[in-house]
Image: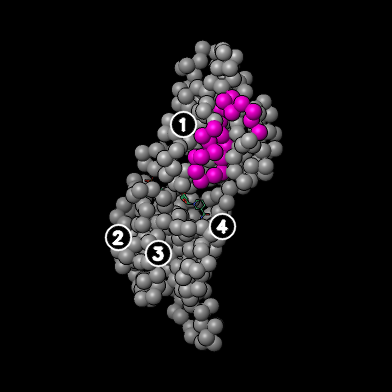
């Protein structure tokens, strides 16, 4: 019984070493980690190399699921976790954990960390910059005009004369904002805490932020407070001819309100990477709308090369009883 306890016991993630008389016991402890998700086989060998003393196996490979004390997952629901009763820690490989958090089957007491992949802000900043520059240089207008053989020049301001509004100034929003600032854009940011960010005009007033955003980039997490935030009121607050870039989550947008604002030519164009239903259903109007660009949720992806050290560090901390990194605040929802 004691041997079984030693094998499966995971000190509370924030207990430091208070509960362990002999810290080395935990440093030596082997973790049993289940890796769940359709990319599991891509990750497992790298995880084994990073933490050779731990056991990693895919879902279904454990003859006794009770020995599993940690999970590394890339799935949107808690169902596959239910067969592991001793789980003390879940490490998501995704930065957004909204789908998982909304699953009532997720154990509220199991520590959950989201992925904060150091490569992802770089990747997201590239995507945001590409879309912002395209909108700034009227790429959408000229592409439509070409289809109509229409030779029509638009007045072209320079970046400092263009205001980009960034909704969400977290890991991804901050990096994207700073890249745009380096290009000379004026960046206004909206966040819950309105924490200052170098070079960004930060406000906690959404209407103010939207009213100046000629290009609005959404990089909020999806929570009860942000669901449907891009609705008729938000679109009315945005200047006429504004462009929306949604790389947050599909459910931030009220689709019917956006389509109305596009049809009314209040919003000039929407570049949408994320959708309430993914893949975007074939019959959805977004696919054929002349003022919409669709990309298939590819703005930024977790890369094993940059994620593995993050996962390995959290597993080391778990085994040592040290505070874990990037724990999700269940009350805030992100
Ligand atoms: P993060 O670090 O958690 O930052 C979230 C930001 O949003 C923070 O600035 C936060 O404010 C702000 N915020 C949260 N709730 C708010 C509210 N109610 N009102 C105003 N501001 C609020 O998140 P992240 O890592 O940057 O990621 C953002 C999101 O990007 C993810 O949740 C995910 O949905 C999405 N994402 C998309 C892709 C893609 O490929 N399209 C890839 C990765 C992630 P505070 O600063 O005050 O906390």
State which tag comes first along the sequence, 2 or 3.
2
Split into 4 quadrants, where in the image is the N terminus?
Answer: top right
Label annotation for residue 298: 4
Tell me: 115 left or right of 253: right
Residue toward you, 171 or 79: 79
Compute the Cα span from label 1 to label 4: 30 Å
In the picture of the structure, the residue carrying the numbered disc 2 is 207
Q: Residues within 10 Å of mark 1 (few under 14, many from 20)?
A: some
Residue toward you, 169 or 247: 247
State which tag comes first along the sequence, 3 or 4.
3
State which tag comes first along the sequence, 1 or 2.
1
State which tag comes first along the sequence, 4 or 2.
2
Label annotation for residue 255: 3
Ligand 1 within 8 angstroms of badge 1 C-beta: no
Residue at image position (45%, 22%) is 15
Counting from the top left corner in percent of width and height, residue 198 is at: 42, 50
Label annotation for residue 110: 1
Compute the Cα span from label 2 to label 3: 19 Å
Circle 4/circle 2 CB separation < 8 Å? no
The residues colored magenta run: 61-83
Compute the Cα span from label 3 to label 1: 34 Å
Ligand 1 within 8 angstroms of badge 3 C-beta: no
Determine the secondary structure under disc 2.
helix
Determine the secondary structure under disc 1.
loop
Determine the secondary structure under disc 4.
loop
Q: Residues within 10 Å of mark 3 (few under 14, many from 20)?
A: some
Circle 2/circle 3 CB separation < 8 Å? no
């Amino acid at each position: 019984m004691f041997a079984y306890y030693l094998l499966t016991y995971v000190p509370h993630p924030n207990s430091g070493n208070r509960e362990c008389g002999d810290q080395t016991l935990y440093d030596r402890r082997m973790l049993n980690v289940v890796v769940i998700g359709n990319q599991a086989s891509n990750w497992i060998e790298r995880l084994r190399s990073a933490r050779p003393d731990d056991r990693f196996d895919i879902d279904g490979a454990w003859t006794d699921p009770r020995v599993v004390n940690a999970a590394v997952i890339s799935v949107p629901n808690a169902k596959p976790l239910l067969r592991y009763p001793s789980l003390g820690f879940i490490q998501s490989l995704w930065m957004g954990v909204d789908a998982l958090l909304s699953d009532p089957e997720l154990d509220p007491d199991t520590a959950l960390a989201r992925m904060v992949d150091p490569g992802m802000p770089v990747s997201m900043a590239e995507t945001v910059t590409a879309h912002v520059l395209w909108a700034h240089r009227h790429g959408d207008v000229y592409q439509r005009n070409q289809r109509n053989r229409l030779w029509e020049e638009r007045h072209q301001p320079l970046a400092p004369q263009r205001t980009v509004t960034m909704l969400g100034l977290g890991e991804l929003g901050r990096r994207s904002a700073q890249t745009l600032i380096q290009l000379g854009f004026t960046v206004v940011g909206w966040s819950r805490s309105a924490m200052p960010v170098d070079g960004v005009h930060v406000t906690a007033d959404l209407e103010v932020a939207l009213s100046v955003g000629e290009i609005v980039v959404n990089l909020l997490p999806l929570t009860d407070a942000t669901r449907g935030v891009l609705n008729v009121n938000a679109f009315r607050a945005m200047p006429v001819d504004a462009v929306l870039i949604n790389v947050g989550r599909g459910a931030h947008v009220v689709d019917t309100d956006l389509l109305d604002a596009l049809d009314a030519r209040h919003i000039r164009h929407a570049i949408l990477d994320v959708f309430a239903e993914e893949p975007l259903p074939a019959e959805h109007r977004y696919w054929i709308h002349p003022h919409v660009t669709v990309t298939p949720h590819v703005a930024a992806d977790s890369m094993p090369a940059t994620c593995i050290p993050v996962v390995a560090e959290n597993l080391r901390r778990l085994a040592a009883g040290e505070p874990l990194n990037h724990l999700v605040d269940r009350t805030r929802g992100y």
